[in-house]
Amino acid sequence: MTPEAYLTAVGACPGHRVLDRLGDKWVSLVLKELGEGPCRSGELSRTLAGVSRKMLTQTLRGLERDGLVARTTTGGAPSQVEYRLTPLGRGLREAMLVVVGWAEAHIGEVDAARAAYDGNC
Amino acid sequence: MTPEAYLTAVGACPGHRVLDRLGDKWVSLVLKELGEGPCRSGELSRTLAGVSRKMLTQTLRGLERDGLVARTTTGGAPSQVEYRLTPLGRGLREAMLVVVGWAEAHIGEVDAARAAYDGNC
DNA sequence: CTGTATCCACATTGATACTG
DNA sequence: CAGTATCAATGTGGATACAG
């Protein structure tokens, strides 16, 4: 298929676009953290153990661009920046929590199925 | 961070694991298609315009392994294979539809925010 | 403290050709 | 028809060093 056709078929579907973003490595974790209250950049770095500064900034920029997260800088040196969810972001978080809830309730069945599948090799 | 620490913090979280899978390029589309009824492999190829045979098989294998999709072969030549959602898969599909619903309702706001952000460059 | 730029290793994906 | 194997291109994420 041509790249254009692919973009039309998949890239334009709202559901797919949003699921794709939620699947990004750090998006769900940022949403979870910010859901519990505004947070400074440094705090996020520490809480989301393992995220590099680059990816954290990149993730936050993407969410900010999509209107899901708001950024407030308390100018000065050393600079201070705070992130928090917008109403839109809180809405996405709620939807995400439905999936997370399903996951926590059924991950055992998934793992069992996986073990069974791998066993009957 | 060490790879192990990363795996512990992120890879083990049920919510993250499931969101990660839903973010896979073709998973959501397969779930959507199979949600409307069992389907042959060839039908899926045609409906999910743009998927390569390799990725389709790979996606279906993954879902099958997780107990979300069941595979039935009506042996013979030419061989026939049918895929359908398991009860577990239907449950995940329901959870996914919540996110998809949010996406369809709010994608306009996201696009507006994005346009505004890009405008104020 | 926060954010950016560069480089690099790795995973993901798709084209192609081939086997039951 | 269904699935597999291989190779090449691309994208993604992270380490590091640097700038405001």
Image (tube, coloured by chain):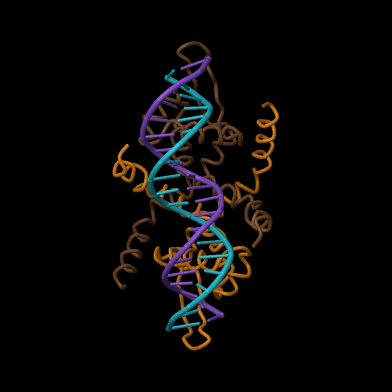
Chain colours: A orange, B brown, C purple, D cyan
In the image, what residue occupies the spot 34% across and 48% down? A12
**Residue reaching furthest top?**
B76
Q: Nearer the viewer, residue A97 or D15?
A: D15
- The residue shown at (29%, 44%) is A4
Whether residue B58 is situated above or below residue A96 in the rendered picture: above
Which residue ends up furthest to the bottom in the rendered image? Answer: A76
Q: Where in the figure is residue B106, as x and y percent of width and height?
A: 39, 57
> Compared with residue A38, is residue B90 higher up or lower down, i.e. above or below?
above
Relative horizontal placement of residue B120, taking residue B88 as reference (left or right): left
Image quarter hosting the C terminus of chain A: top right
Q: Which residue sits at x=64%, y=53%?
A: B13
Locate the N terminus of chain A and report the quarter of the image it occupies: top left
What residue appears at the point 51 percent right and 36 percent down from the top-left corner? Answer: B59
**How many numbered marks, from 0 up?**
0
Task: Return the residue nearer the eye: B71 or A100.
Answer: B71
Work out whether B36 lies above or below A100: above
Nearer the observer, C11 or B88: C11
Quick check: D2 left or right of A109?
left
Q: Position of residue B27 (x, y in %)?
A: 48, 40
Left or right, B100 with respect to B69, comes to left
**Residue B112 percent location from the top left of the image:** 32, 63
Q: Quadrant of residue B68?
A: top right
